[in-house]
Each structure stands twice: as structure tokens, then as C-alpha cells.
Image (cartoon, helix red, strand yellow):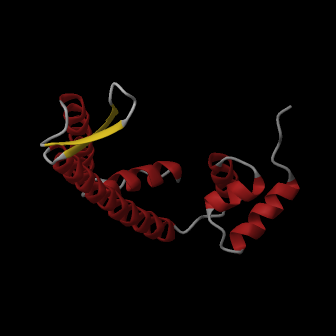
Amino acid sequence: MARTFSAEDEERLRQLHADGVSRNGIARQMGWSVGTITNHAQRLGLFFDREAVRAATDARQVDLKERRQRIQEQLLDLAERAIGRAQSRYLVHGFSHTGESVAEWLQEPPARETKDLTTAATQALNGAVKLAEFDAEHDDKNLSAIDRFLSKAMGESEPEE
């Protein structure tokens, strides 16, 4: 059975709004979608501080970019380690025909291990490149996309770019 937005819901929405709770926070607390909260807030003449949302979104974008850059560095480190292992001496363990444990150092890993290490290095490098490409493509576009989204959500015309 579908729920209806009751007078109690309206009062709670007004109170949470007055307390400075964000639209998403109100939706979470009340168990309604953000769109439902937006529609009822507009109907009740309640508006949310777009500048606060914009500042929070900007801060989140900066945090995510820093995180992508840390991951990119880790991927590059992983690629370097894999390449280094593919080019270094390799200890092979096995058993002799009598069942004794035998170990032997090779000048480089066997072909299968070299292939696996090269594949790991390539995948890590590809991941690092994709993160760098994403940041390069989205450096100047994030805010305008966010502006368009917020404008549509608020029922306003799109801002000039």
C-alpha cells in the first residue's frame, strides 16, 4: 500500500528544515526519497541553501580527486614492483625424484611467472592512466554538471556557463 505524506510528515519536514538538516538528511531520517522531500518542501515554501550544498559538493569532489590520486600512486608503485620482480632473480622450490625439498635461484622468473607479473604491471598501469584521464576530463566540468543538476532539482532554468 502506498504511503501518503501526512500532516505529521509536513510538520517534521518543517522542523528538520528549521534545524538546518540537509535535504538528503531529511530524506534519510524520514524514510522518503530526496525527490519527495524536494517536492513537499517547495509546496510548503521551504528552500534549501544551494551554496551550502555547492560547498559540500565541491569539498567532496576535492576529497575524491585526492583519493583517486593516492590510488593512482599505489597502482604505479604496484606496477613498478611487478616489473622489478619480473626482472630480478627468482627462487624456485620443488621436490627431487627422492622427495627431498629443492630450491634453486634462477636469473629471472620462468616464462609463466614473467607473463603474470607483466600482466599485473600492465593492468596497474592501465588503471593509473584511466584515473589520470578521468581527472583530466572532469577538472573543469564537475561544477557545471552539478550546477545543471541542482538547477533541475530546484525547478529552475539552467545557469549560464
* Residue 123, horizontal then vertical, whole percent: 26, 39
* Residue 114, horizontal then vertical, whole percent: 19, 35
The quarter of the displayed image where residue 115 is located: top left
The quarter of the displayed image where residue 102 is located: top left
Left-right relation of 13 to 24: right
Asked if residue 125 is positioned above or below residue 10 in the image, the reply reads above
Residue lying at the far front in this picture: please name it.
98
Left-right relation of 160 to 8: left
Asked if residue 99 is positioned above or below residue 58 in the image, the reply reads above
Asked if residue 98 is positioned above or below residue 71 in the image, the reply reads above
> Which part of the image, by quadrant, shows the N terminus?
top right
The quarter of the displayed image where residue 47 is located: bottom right
4 or 25, nearer to the observer? 25
The answer to whether residue 157 is visible is yes
Q: Give the residue at x 16% y 47%.
A: 89
Left-right relation of 29 to 76: right
